[in-house]
Image: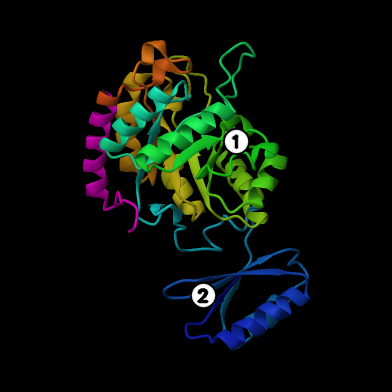
Amino acid sequence: MIITLKKGTDAKSLDTLTQWLRSQSIEAHVSEGEYSTIVGLIGDTSKLDTDLIQGLPMVENVTRISEPYKNANRKFHPDDTVVDISGYKIGGGNFQLIAGPCSVESREQIISIAKDVKKSGANLLRGGAFKPRTSPYAFQGMREQGLELLREAKKETGMPIVTEIMDASHIELFDDVDVFQVGARNMQNFELLKELGKTDKPILLKRGLANTLQELLMSAEYIMAGGNSKIILCERGIRTFEPAMRNTLDITAVPLLKKLTHLPIIVDPSHAAGIADMVHPLSLAAAAAGADGIMIEVHNDPQHALCDGPQALTPERFDAVAKDVMKIIGITGKTMNGAEK
């Protein structure tokens, strides 16, 4: 249920309303916009008297909503959420490029790539330390050593780091990580999502390869129900009947999610197709569709990469993509901002 308050409602009246709602075992989430204040109700609202609430002097209208996701729902929170990552903002007209290798392989590799992608306009560094792989015999990442190398790259370049967390027991180990990435395979690892909800770190939540948008938003709801609203959604392609590419990028997810939720949405074109040549056009499509950011895999020697080499761009190819994306961002009116001083 959503209660829209009349413009000019004073803080005392709002506090009285929220206290009464809590006495009815209903959580009240207040969202103050430029033109109105919205109170989103979480809990069993079936016993609340809608007519009674509608009759209060401060209430503009009362709306019952049917979607199962509440905190993530744009109806609860009309204004875009802006996630701040060490001064770099995503959402609300702020656009970011996130780039780096699929997997951290050596100190020289990660620092070299970090410097290159930063020079081309990326503000956030991605890199896998722990790697979930389909085959148990494939490279699983450098694990703790990989995290240490990411920290070195951050110290060298000043770039906040984004890396995948696979288990709740790793949260303390990831203390210096700026953004926890939840991979497609873990999108519905609800116990992990619950624990991430107790943290105060931004969460990059990837859509599962066979999950609906509502399921993605329900996964975000798990995190938000724990108290963490710093969530960035990521469309990374879904599995379809088409075998010509690794996955099919659901570009329609970007504008549709913009209607359904206030959370920022980015696109990962590297995993979408799994083909390096496709990354450039898919990146442009994502930017034109209104995405709040793009995450691209970059490797200085893709042919010898230990993980996902066929989809990785060289630094030179990434530079070309970044330049073209920036042109589109300029047209759409978004801002590729740097860290605030």
Would you identify the image quadrant in which residue 323 lies?
A: top left
Q: Please name the residue that numbered disc 1 is placed on.
A: 165
Is residue 334 found inside the magenta-colored segment of the image? yes
Q: Please name the residue that numbered disc 2 is placed on.
A: 37
Image quadrant for the N terminus?
bottom right
Image quadrant for the C terminus?
bottom left
Is residue 188 found inside the magenta-colored segment of the image? no
Mark 2 or 1 closer to N-term?
2
Q: Nearer the viewer, residue 282 or 110?
A: 110
The magenta-colored residue range is 317-341
- Relative horizontal placement of residue 283, taking residue 25 as reference (left or right): left
Q: Residue 211: percent from the left, percent from the top?
A: 59, 34
**Above or below, comparing residue 122 to residue 38 in the picture:** above
Q: Residue 29: percent from the left, percent from the top?
A: 61, 68
Query: Which SS type dominates the magenta stretch?
Result: helix
Residue 275 in sight: yes
Would you identify the image quadrant in which residue 269 lies?
A: top left
Residue type beneath disc 2: Thr
Neighbourhood count class around disc 1 (C-alpha, 10 Å): few under 14, some 14–19, many 20 upward: many
